[in-house]
Amino acid sequence: MKRCVQQKLVEAGCDEAGRGPLAGPVVGASVILPPRFRNKWIRDSKTLTPRMIAELRPLIEEKAIAWAVGVASHTEVDKINILNASYLAIHRSLDLLPVRPEYLSMDGNRFLPYKNTPFACVVKGDAKFKNIAAASILAKSYRDDLMCELHERFPMYAWERNKGYPTKEHREAIRAHGPCEFHRRSFQLLPVMQHKL
């Protein structure tokens, strides 16, 4: 896996976590890795165990030239839709970077331009480039922590396990208790009942 998309400019890899859940925020992250950065364990966060993510997060934060995390709330998701909220979370992470990137690499196939900074969209970029993978790890780690904090207030939804994703357990809890203030009202919280004629 290569470190970044191109080698000449200061490049930030960017990714988000939390597009699919029924509750909670979407979190974006941006990471600028040093030129000679090496680590064989950094890859798409979806392929890593929670323990590996917990171990890699402080390593990324220590070794990166710069990193930052941005958040778009569940209410912003409902207001501007999940795709635009994902862009907003990443833009906020870029705003917080202490080093201004000259180039951006994004996981996925589209992005909303940021301050005229050139960028590349890479499908499955978190499996191809270390800087995007590092961003995916930070975004997932920080979002998981936020959902565990919310679990303390709303334990009936088991967010410490499902992180707000539409698992059977989560949907059964919504059916039993109703949605709470952190559920995304623009999402289909319960499946539509299908009746055979």
Image (spheres, grey):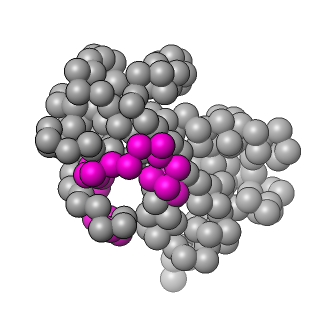
Q: Could you say where residue 64 lies in the image, as x and y percent from the top left?
A: 40, 28
Q: Could you say where residue 168 lies in the image, as x and y percent from the top left?
A: 61, 48
**Quarter where residue 146 is shown:** top right
Residue nearest the observer in this picture, 40 or 164: 40
| Residue pictured at 71% horizontal, 52% vertical | 172
Residue nearest the observer in this picture, 85 or 156: 85
Taking 156 as reference, is 163 left or right?
left
Q: State whether residue 65 is above or below residue 16.
A: above
Q: Could you say where residue 117 lies in the image, as x and y percent from the top left?
A: 29, 61
Q: Is residue 136 visible?
A: no
Of the 4 image quadrants, the one containing the N terminus is top left
Q: Could you say where residue 126 lies in the image, as x and y percent from the top left?
A: 30, 40
Which span is picked out in magenta? 92-113
| Residue pictured at 65% horizontal, 63% vertical | 74
**Quarter where residue 11 is shown:** top left
Q: Is residue 72 visible?
A: yes
Seen from this angle, which residue lies furthest bottom? 197
| Residue pictured at 25% horizontal, 52% vertical | 103
Would residue 72 be counted in the magenta stretch? no
Seen from this angle, which residue lies furthest front? 99
Taking 165 as reference, is 34 left or right?
left
**Quarter where residue 109 is shown:** bottom left
Q: State whether residue 6 is above or below residue 103.
A: above
Q: State whether residue 142 is above or below residue 27.
A: above
